[in-house]
Image (spheres, grey):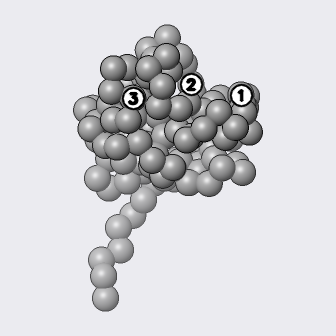
Amino acid sequence: MGVLTAILVSTMTVSVTSYQSLKSQTDSTPFITSIGDRVSNAGCAVSHDLLKAKVICYGDAVQIPNLGIRIVNDTMNIRIKRSIDIWVPSYEAEKLIGLRLNQVITVIKSPQRRCRK
């Protein structure tokens, strides 16, 4: 049998948006996240204030209503507060997500979480 690791789960309210790998929406490396991962449907970016407060860290999973579970592997522009950004491959997918205010998400804290790059 494997070892059972306790995982702390919490909820919080955030805004949810989406982004594409475009230079107008990212930095000079639009397909690479801030921790060096390649962007994917499995990941998401979080605002700096959430990382700084250590309520969400790199490696944590977030469950977003109607969007599923994503792993935190990127950060948003520092001016954005209390938000999560979902990577999408197309403008059509971006329009489907839109801006979702006051979304109650579930944070599943990873045993391997990192609160800094």
Residue 14: quadrant of the picture: top right
Residue 107 location (% of width, % of height): 52, 47
Amino acid type, mark 1:
Leu
Residue under circle 3? Answer: 30
Residue 55, compared with residue 81, is above or below; it is below
Q: Mark 2, residues whose alpha carbon is within 10 Å: few (<14), some, or many (≥20)?
A: some
Secondary element type, mark 2:
loop
Disc 1 vs disc 2: which is toward the camera?
Answer: 1
Asked which secondary structure carries label 1, the reply is loop
| Residue depicted at x 54% and y 19% | 81
Q: Nearer the viewer, residue 24 or 83?
A: 24
Find residue 112 and report its horizontal and vertical position in percent: 29, 53
Residue 80 drawn above or below residue 97: above
- Mark with earlier residue (1, 3): 3
Q: Nearer the viewer, mark 1 or mark 3?
A: 3
Q: Residues within 10 Å of mark 1 (few under 14, many from 20)?
A: few
Which residue in the structure is indicated by mark 1?
Answer: 99
Q: Earlier in the sequence, mark 1 or mark 2?
A: 2
